[in-house]
Amino acid sequence: KLIFPGVGAFGSMMSILNDKNFTAPLKAYLDSDRPFLGICLGMQALLEKSAEAPGIKGLGLFPGETIRFDTDLAVPHIGWNGIHIKQPSAIFNGLSGKERFYFVHSFHIVPADGNDVLTTTDYGGEFASGIQRGNIIGIQFHPEKSGPAGLKLLKNFIETGTGQAKPVQAAQETSLARRIIACLDVRSNDQGDLVVTKGDQYDVRENGNVRNLGRPVELAGRYYQEGADEITFLNITGFRDFPLEDMPMIDVLKQTSRNVFVPLTIGGGIRDYTDKNGRQYTALEVAAEYFRSGADKISIGSDAVLIAEQYLKTGRRTGTSAIEEISRVYGNQAVVISIDPRRVYVKSPDQVRHTVIKTAVPGPGKEKYCWYQCTIRGGREGRDLDALTLARVCEKLGAGEILLNCIDRDGTGQGFDLELINAVKKAVTIPVIASSGAGCVEHFHEVFTATRAEAALAAGIFHRREVPLAEVKEFLRGKVPVRL
C-alpha cells in the first residue's frame, strides 16, 4: 500500500517527481491498481494538469484538471469542512459521514468522469473533494490533521476490511467551521528552560521573571484534547545563533506532532541568518526544516514588514523574499503573515498618507479617526506603514493567511478589535485570524458575528483556564459553525 501525502505547490511537486525519476515507477504502481491514497497534492497529481502550474503535466491517471477556486469567499479554503460521500468505500468504515476534516488549498480538482467522484464538499459551490477508481483513492483534505476522524480513515486504508460505508442520506450543504486556535508563545526563561509565556501588551515579565505558563509539548497536547482546531507556536526568543538542526523549536514540533493531529503553525526566526559556526541559512531552508519536523504553516512577522517596505520602495518583487520563496515551493497556504499593529489617532484623514478609518472608539483627545501602525521587534519599534497596506502587499507576494494581532487589546480581556478586523478583511481576499483581547466566551461569538474572520486565536485565557477552550466551543454550538 502506498500513501502519497502532498504539501506544497503542484509545479514543484511534479518537478521533484520527474527529477528523481519517480514518475515512471509511480505510474506503473497506479496502473497495477494496487492500494493507493493520495492526499491533497497527492490527489491533484493523479489528474492531467493544474492551473497552478500551466504546461506541467500531472500523472494523468484520472481525466480532468485542477483549477483555482472562483468564489467571493476567502481563498485559500482553510479549515474544517464536511463531505458528501458519493460512492461506497471501505475507507469510511465506522464513520457517520457527518465528520469535519481539515482542508487547506486554493485549487480543487474537476474530474472529467463524474463516476470517479468519491466525495464532494461545499465552498462557494460544490466541488469534488475525493476520487476513487478501484483501489486508487485521492482526497483533498488532510486526515493526518483531522483528529480522531482522520486517524480512523487512515486506519481504514491501512487495514482495509470487507464492510462498506453507506453514502450519506441527507444532501445537506456542508459548511466551513470557524476555527478556534490556541497560541503558545515560547521562549527560554532565565534558567534556560523552554517555557510557554504570555505578555500583557507584549511584556512577558512579571516581578522581574519570565511568566512560566507551562511546557510547550504538554500544553499543546492538552489543547488538542480540549478540541483546538489548530495550534500555533510563536518562538519569541529567536535562538539566532543556533545551528538549524539544534533549534529548540525543532524538537518541540517533532514531539508535539507525535500526539497532536491538528495543524501546527510555527512563527519566529523564519529568516536568513548565520549561526555561531558561520554557517548561513536561507529563510526557505529554515521553513523546510520546520515543515519536515511537523509544522503545517509558518508565520512571518517583523521580516514581512521589512519585505513590504522594500516592495513599496521599488515597486518590484525580488523573487527572493521569504514570502515569495516559501510560497513558491510550499504554496501560499503555507505562509501566514503575523501583523502586530497599534492604533495611532489623528484628527483628520488628511493628516497622514496611511489608510485611515473612522472609529467608534475616540482617542485621548476625542479624535474620531485612526490608522494602524505596523510594528517590529515584538512591538517595540513602530514603522511608517499601516496594517492594511502590509496585508495587501503580503497577499500580492504570496501569503495565504493573516494572523491579525492588536497591541492595544493584547492581554486586556476587552474583546477583539472589530474595527481593525473588518478593515483588514475588506483589504484582502485571503483568510484572517483574529487575535488579541479575548476575555470571555462571548467575545468569540462577537468576533464571528460582527466580522467575517475565519478564525479566532487566544493564549493567556486558555493557558490559565480563565476561559477553557472547550467552553468556547460549547458556547458557539448552534450559533456559528464550529467543529465539536
Image: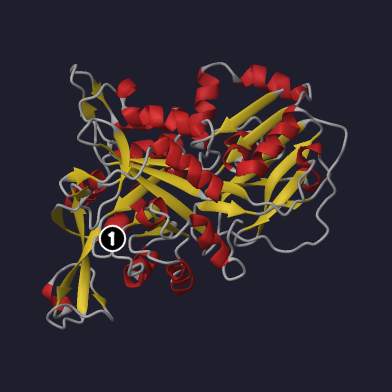
Q: State the residue in front, 219 or 307.
A: 219
Count the labels in the image: 1
Residue 449 in the image, given as x and y percentages of width and height: 48, 73
Figure colour scheme: secondary structure
Q: State the residue in front, 78 or 61.
A: 78
Q: Amino acid at mark 1?
A: Asp
Residue 162 vs 196, above or below: the answer is above
Q: Residue at x 19, y 44 (%)?
A: 209
Report whether 324 appears left or right of 190: right
Report whether 43 appears left or right of 264: right
Quadrant in the picture for the N terminus: top right
* Disc 1 packing (10 Å; few <14; some 14–19; many ≥20): many
Q: Residue at x 59, y 31 (%)?
A: 5
Q: State the residue in front, 263 or 252.
A: 252
| Res 215 quadrant in image | top left
| Res 474 quadrant in image | bottom right
Q: Residue at x 62, y 28 (%)?
A: 4
Task: Provide the residue designation for mark 1.
Answer: 410
Q: Which element type, helix, strand or loop, lies under badge 1?
A: loop
Residue 446 in the image, given as x and y percentages of width and height: 45, 72
Residue 212 vs 433, above or below: the answer is above
Quadrant in the picture for the C terminus: bottom right
Residue lying farthest to the front in this orientation: 207
Task: Residue 291: tell me if it is visible.
Answer: no
Q: Residue at x 33, y 60 (%)?
A: 436
Task: Residue 363: tell me if it is visible.
Answer: yes
Report whether 157 appears left or right of 250: right
Residue 430 in the image, given as x and y percentages of width and height: 43, 56
Residue 73 in the image, given as x and y percentages of width and height: 52, 62
